[in-house]
Amino acid sequence: MRVKINYELCEGHGRCFDNAYEMFDEREDGKGVAKMEVVPDDDFDMQRAARSAAMMCPMNAIEIIEDD
Ligand code: SF4
């Protein structure tokens, strides 16, 4: 799984790094940043954190790209 933040959409609401802090950090400009772009297949906790942050993001800025 890959995790990307679309910075055209992200407004720095912080729900990703407040709630899924194991997966996201806060950038200097207040926007979120994924701690890892590629989440290993067997890291279910990190996958869950990424998916829940994507659902919580009010700007729909977190993109989850599933592996084929
Ligand atoms: S929750 Fe969404 S809008 Fe807020 S910082 Fe994270 S990615 Fe950006």
Image: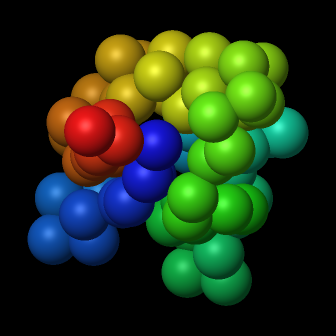
Up-down relation of residue 34 to residue 24 (above or below)? below
Q: Nearer the viewer, residue 61 or 29?
A: 61
The percent coordinates of residue 1 (x first, y second) are 46, 43
Q: Quadrant of residue 4?
A: bottom left
Asked whether the viewer can see residue 14, the reply is: yes
In this rendering, does residue 13 appear at all?
no
Residue lying farthest to the left in this orientation: 8
Q: Is residue 9 above or below residue 55?
A: below
Q: Quadrant of the C terminus?
A: top left
Q: Going by the image, does 9 lie left or right of 23? A: left
Determine whether, in the image, residue 12 is placed left or right of residue 65. right
Q: Residue furthest front?
A: 68
Estimate the x, y position of residue 48 in percent, counting from the top left.
62, 17
At 67% across and 83% down in the image, what residue appears? 28
Image coordinates for residue 45, horizontal then vertical, percent: 78, 20
Q: Quick check: 3 above or below 67? A: below
Where on the picture, by quarter, is residue 67? Answer: top left
Q: Position of residue 18 (x, y in %)?
A: 72, 34
- Count of marks overlaid on the render: 0
Of residues 2 and 33, the one nearer the viewer is 2
Q: Is residue 25 left or right of residue 14?
A: right
Q: Say which residue appears at 55% left-offset and 80% top-offset.
A: 29
- In this view, the residue farthest toward the bottom is 28
- Residue 24, placed above or below residue 66: below
**Residue 15: which quarter of the image?**
top right
- Residue at image x 57%, y 58%? 38
Viewed as shown, does residue 32 lie left or right of 66?
Answer: right
Residue at position x 51%, y 16% from top?
52
Report the colour scheme.
Answer: rainbow
In this view of the protein, which residue sits in the foreground, 24 or 59?
A: 24
